[in-house]
Amino acid sequence: MKYIDEFRDRAKAETLVVEINRLIEKIAPPAPLAIMEVCGGHTHSIFRYGIEGMLPPEIELVHGPGCPVCVLPMGRIDDCLAIADRSEVILTTFGDAMRVPGSRGSLLQAKAAGADIRMVYSPMDALALARKNPDRELVFFGLGFETTMPSTALTVLQAEREGIRNFSVFCNHITIVPTIKAILDSPGLHIDAFLGPGHVSMVTGISPYHFIADYYRRPFVIAGFEPLDVLQSIWMVLKQIAEGRCQVENQYGRVVPEKGNIPALAAVARVYELREFFEWRGLGSIDQSGVRFREEYAAFDAERKFTVPNVKVADPSVCQCGEVLKGAIKPWQCRVFGTACTPENPLGALMVSSEGACAAYFQYGGVPKRVPEHA
Amino acid sequence: MCLGIPGQIVRIDDEENLLATVDVCGVRRKVNIACIVEDGEPIAACIGVWVLVHVGFAMARIDEDEAIETLRMLEELAEMQDELRAMSEPDPAQAAE
């Protein structure tokens, strides 16, 4: 496959590993360097290709909060189920969201119990269902970071153009920058550098991240998702550390333009506005980290069209998702990892999506040979 | 959901709604190309363009030159390593003495 196979080349990966080791020798860090990959897509690649095992012990990869399915709080799933319970509603969403547990089960369980819930590949497929079923209310459970935000916005704009009235979105889109800031401000949590989210950045461009390098003084390298991309990005991070630089660099130039995607950003700005705050599973409430529909698009807002309970539900007390999300513990150090919480029966959201750190550890046998030391 | 996949635009299906068919490893699917159409360029010019597809939307044009540049840089790194390795090997002339 073009643009994929050439970025999985073993010889080039070995070259990069040699360079990474050379730089680590030069830096000689007193404690392992904590490099956080912000995006769940990177977490998935790191496990799928066994990248952790190729790296010297002086590098610790910390798996960040960038899996939109994993950070959805239970209360939002409950609200979604309340909408799906209505007999006139057909609820649609991406496959990843089907198994996220709410306090009274997941969408998949509600579907088995008779609710009309359907999996779609694209929000445009949900709109097509609205056209086909004019006597039903079609609700799309929209979630994701800036990567998927434009697709939902463009679908709503298309519905507006066609005058489709039986289509709305339960909007759970979130934005990554306030969350990185929350992590950087989190006491007792030290991250030395970041691998930046490639596909979020393809939409936002690279300017939103400058404060991380300029103000927080951390190297930030926007990374692609193939193994060579991830390794090269780690190498670029180390090069910055070795040379005493803190910059935003773009390893994924073939996909990420400096200015981002202008039409996508225009659609996002037209349809959404920032919420004052949004609740994240495991991380709590983060200011201005989510979006909702602007007043002009209220007719497409499922939260305004239907009443939702909007109840805050605490995560199961045995779950340690929050600590894993912040990188404070490794997935396998959670007290229910692989026992009460498995991909088949997830208790915590990190076990649900293939982009979640726990599911990745579980699926690819990620319990490492070396145990990082904890103070 | 967040993993995109590269594909090539093979046909424009609906100019007004900016829908095109993309070939992803032999699988063909209709996608929205509103985000990658360039101002002042005829839509037909998108045929043959490689894009990254996310949930039914082409979200970026893939820049071939940038892809080649990344790989070229890695090749240079490998050449440098070979050179260093060759330098650190004992000189055969001296070894023969």
Image (cartoon, rainbow, N blue to C red):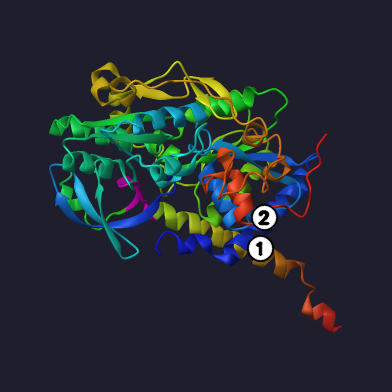
| Amino acid residing under circle 1 | Gln
Same chain, marks 2 and 1? no
Say whether marks 2 and 1 touch (CB < 8 Å). yes
Residue A117 seen in render: yes
Instruction: For label 2, count other residues whose C-alpha is less than 10 Å away and answer few (under 14), some (14-19) or many (20+).
Output: many
> Residue A301's image quarter?
top left
> Magenta span has B62?
yes
Secondary structure category for the residue under label 1: helix
Secondary structure category for the residue under label 2: helix
> Magenta span has A174?
no
Q: Main secondary structure of the magenta part?
A: strand
Q: Which residue is mark 1?
A: B81
In this rendering, the label closer to the viewer, 2 or 1: 2
Where residue A9 appears, as percent x and y from the top left, is 54, 65
Where residue A302 appears, as percent x and y from the top left, is 31, 26
Image quadrant containing the C terminus of chain A = top right
What residue do we see at 79% from left, 48% from top?
A371
Where residue A174 appears, as percent x and y from the top left, is 44, 29
The boundaries of the magenta stretch are B51-64
- Seen in the image, is A185 located left or right of residue B20? right
Where residue B52 appears, as percent x and y from the top left, is 36, 50
What residue do we see at 76% from left, 46% from top?
A58
- Seen in the image, is A268 located left or right of residue A328? left
Q: Which residue is mark 2?
A: A19
| Amino acid residing under circle 2 | Glu
